[in-house]
Amino acid sequence: MYKLIFLLFFSVSLCSCQDFGDLNIVASLPAALEEISGIEKNPKSDLIWAVSDSNNSATLYGFNPRTQNIEEAINLHGIENKDWEDMALDTEGNLYIGDFGNNNNKRKHLAIYKVPSVSEETEQRTVYTTTFEYEDQTQFPPKKKHRNFDVESFIHLNNHFYLFTRNRSSHFDGTVKVYKIPATPGHHTAKVVTDYKICDDKSNCQITGATIDFKTGTVVLLSHSKIWLLTAYNTDDFFSGNIEEIELGHSSQKESICFKDANTLYIADEQNGILGGNVYEFQLNK
């Protein structure tokens, strides 16, 4: 009992003395989501839908930040969690899971899973699969200086998926490639739409998450310590318009981001020792 009280006191003390910069901590994540890798929020629900990355079960979790409890756990039968790295939402409320983690740039089997109607109760849930390959990758893995085929972030827009690379090259220069894939089941080739040198500090400039506000078209990219707001772009050339870089004032293994509402972002980080494993809010208009 005394040990439990001490641990609770230590956890509260640790949280209270940490500096979260411009982030407001709203919830601590349960053990099932300590390796959280993607989140999305349907505007019709208070739940944050979340997944964990490789070596975890093929389960979609509905987490309530107010109660800090998992209120839904949907086991997705017939698929596996090879390396789930992000989630996306479409305008109809369907969820998508990106199984495209590719740290060493040697994976040949990449997939995105569509999970429809998560708000409806059902014993058997049909999952639709899109598989793909990159049009410009011919070596598995390529030379270390050319390793820019890992993806940890994507969005759904106009019946297409847009994937943003996490640059793993040894000669890191901050180049993010954007790939486009039809958001339909079957096998497709991911086409390069554009690329952009976002910043050249490898520790803070690798893209680990993405989200979009369908009402405004604002695309947000995430790294361990920053976000980028992409607005007023031309069609799907997301780097052709305004690019606003924002320091969060806090660095951790952040890999998940979504809109709570038009002015508020949810951001989540993986647990790393006694640090991380939280959901934060970030206000866009202060």
Image (tube, rainbow, N blue to C red):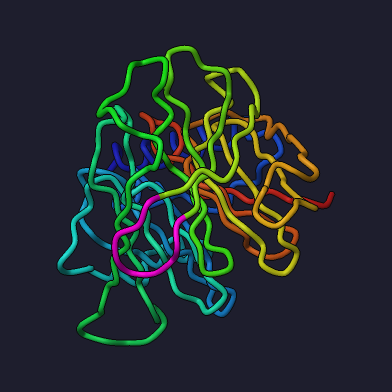
Relative vertical location of residue 228 with respect to residue 115 in this rendering, above or below: above
Looking at this view, name the residue that lies furthest to the right. 286
Q: Residue at x 47, y 48 (%)?
A: 191
Front-most of 185 and 43?
Answer: 185
Looking at this view, name the residue that lies furthest to the left. 78
> Magenta segment, which residues?
181-189
What count of labels does the image hold?
Answer: 0
Q: Main secondary structure of the magenta part?
A: strand
Q: Residue at x 46, y 49 (%)?
A: 28
Q: Is residue 185 left or right of residue 148?
A: left
Q: Residue at x 82, y 52 (%)?
A: 285
Q: Is residue 102 magenta?
A: no
Front-most of 122 and 134?
Answer: 134
Q: Quadrant of residue 73?
A: bottom left
Q: Is residue 180 left or right of residue 250?
A: left
Looking at this view, name the residue that lies furthest to the top. 171
Q: Is residue 184 magenta?
A: yes
Q: Residue at x 32, y 36 (%)?
A: 102
Please state the horizontal and vertical placement of residue 225, each as a whole percent of the image. 60, 31
Front-most of 146 and 172?
Answer: 146
Q: Quadrant of residue 46?
A: bottom right
Please state the horizontal and vertical placement of residue 181, each as a whole percent of the image. 45, 57
Please state the horizontal and vertical placement of residue 95, each as a whole percent of the image. 43, 68
Front-most of 153 and 162?
Answer: 162
Please state the horizontal and vertical placement of residue 121, each as a whole percent of the image. 32, 87
Relative vertical location of residue 158 with respect to residue 44 in this rendering, above or below: above
Relative vertical location of residue 119 with respect to residue 285 in this rendering, above or below: below
Quadrant, the N terminus: top left
Q: Is residue 267 left or right of residue 62?
A: right
